[in-house]
Image (cartoon, rainbow, N blue to C red):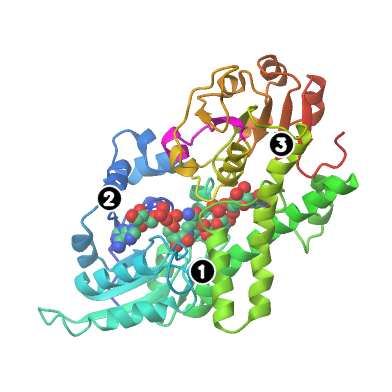
Amino acid sequence: MKSIKKICCIGAGFVGGPTMSVIADKCPHLEINVVDINKKRIDAWNHADFDCLPIYEPGLKDTLKRCRNKNLFFSTDIKKNISSADMIFISVNTPTKTKGIGAGQASDLKWIEACAREIGEYANGETIVVEKSTLPVKTAEMIKSILSSYININKKDQVKEFFILSNPEFLAEGTAISDLEHPDRVLIGGENKNAIESLKNIYLNWVNEEKILTTDLWSSELSKLIANAFLAQRVSSINSISALCESTQANVNEVAQAIGMDSRIGKFFLKPGPGFGGSCFKKDILNLVYICNYYGLKEVASYWEKIITINNWQKKRITRIIWEKMLGNIAGKKISIFGFSFKANTNDTRESPAIDICKDLIEEGCFLSIYDPKVDIGQIKIDLGSEPTKYIESSNNYGQWEFALNKNDSVNGSDAILILSDWSEFFNLNYSLLIKKMRRPSWIFDTRNTINSIDAKNCGFKVWSLGDGNIL
Ligand code: NAD
Ligand code: UGA
């Protein structure tokens, strides 16, 4: 097998961008070209101002400053960069199908298939093709069959040979750079030992060998789906218990701490919240459900489906609680939304629980003043499917929303604050300052357990905190 000098990554998204930045940073001897069909995205990755990158990720700017235009390049020239690459990562989107067979559950693999065709067409000589996207188990079979149809049709009679590897990505948004620099494990699945070694040698530049696990292709593909399903399952488990705590005067954080100290259970992923968001948990579980049903495993499918049922229920019950606490009428009331991203430290809003909860509140007739440290107004317009309106006191503000540049502007004349993302700034709110600008009674609804309930109450707030059954 030839030595790896040039890498091409197809897909410059939340995975392709950060992953290739870290590989380039750790492997200055490699040339890495990240390509995408989306010119606007590529232009943003190439922007002279590092504050205009297409995604916000702590540490990303500094990593890029060290390697962009040195050994890391972003481009729309897919053909050129595929044809000169020794190794090609496929890092394109794999959303849930919206129509046809498997709609609403199966993964839409049309972008994967397009990549396979482009690789088949343009690649030269021996090429290692790495699945970085999250894929249904057995997708490598589909990629292999497409690639093999190009093997003998090279115009210059040059031999093409492909080796397929699965190398799923486990980074979480908000901590992507540190997850990539210090992974719990790197998983490489494949059939060809030399190809596996080539990819392993890249990671060995910064990852200890004992953290690099090699498996067969199918175990690797499936492990990625299962890891996400297990993580989401823990969130749904603790969220279901948050409701039970509210009904029994228990406190979910204390329960989480007590069970998490059992080393068999572990303390991570036990934070209650308004429901998990992000582009992957829901789609990957839906895909798992589809695969189980496909193989006739109905009970297994329905077990995993419940994780999503609980997640939807958790989002729905937030609006109902606000409605009940505010005496059965929230129409015309102003609610300040603190946090719109699906979690802290990212500008990503895909599947953010804030979207569904804000839509429910708007449906009830509330006026929302939405503030998020990193999400911009354009994204909120897309997510809510409506235009913002300026809040005017004592006017007809029913079922509308505005974009607030900061917390203080947002709370002017508000009846309530609703905390939906766990940004660090929501852990140190200036309760006395905020309440002065609000109408009375002033509520804080905290779905992320960021606030100090006692301090907030001492300043005059009425408080509801998710999973806290002790709050009066
Ligand atoms: P994304 O939508 O942010 O990026 C995908 C990019 O691929 C887009 O910019 C799109 O224009 C590009 N693309 C699609 N088809 C193309 C083609 N034929 N040629 C060139 N470019 C093409 O998606 P993402 O969040 O980066 O996720 C990518 C994959 O990684 C998904 O399978 C996802 O499940 C998986 N994953 C995501 C995360 C995460 O945190 N977002 C973490 C681990 C794994
Ligand atoms: C998740 C996984 O953690 C990654 O390992 C995986 O690579 C990635 O999905 C993927 O495949 O896309 P991500 O969605 O970026 O990463 O973020 P998480 O930290 O997992 O959070 C997901 C959602 O669960 C967020 O809405 C978060 O607020 C919520 N969550 C998480 C909780 O409500 N409680 C917790 O204890 C943890």
Q: Report, in whole angstroms, how far the alpha carbon at label 3 lies from the one at label 1.
A: 38 Å
Q: Which residues are magenta?
A: 365-380
Residue at 16% x, 82% y is 153
Which residue is found at the position 57% from the left and 59% from the top?
Answer: 281
What residue did someone put label 1 on?
Answer: 187
Q: On the rendering, which quadrant does ligand 1 occupy? A: bottom left
Residue 48's image quarter? top left
Could you tell me residue 222's position as x and y percent? 54, 74
Determine if residue 15 is in view: no
Horizontal and vertical percent position of residue 161: 26, 80
Q: Identify which amino acid the numbered label 1 is placed on.
A: Leu
Q: Are marks 1 and 2 in contact (CB under 8 Å)?
A: no
Examine the structure image and report whether residue 463 is included in the region drawn in magenta: no
Element marked by disc 1:
strand
Quick one: label 3 or label 2, which is nearer the N terminus? 2
Q: Is residue 47 left or right of residue 356?
A: left
Q: Earlier in the sequence, mark 3 or mark 1?
A: 1
In the rendered image, is residue 340 in sight? yes
SS for dot 2: strand
Q: Is residue 374 above or below residue 33?
A: above
Which mark lies nearer to you, 3 or 1? 3
Q: Which residue is mark 2?
A: 73
Q: Is residue 155 above or below residue 211?
A: below
- The residue indicated by pointer 3 is 446
Residue 223 is left or right of residue 49, and the answer is right
- Residue 62, above or below 224: above
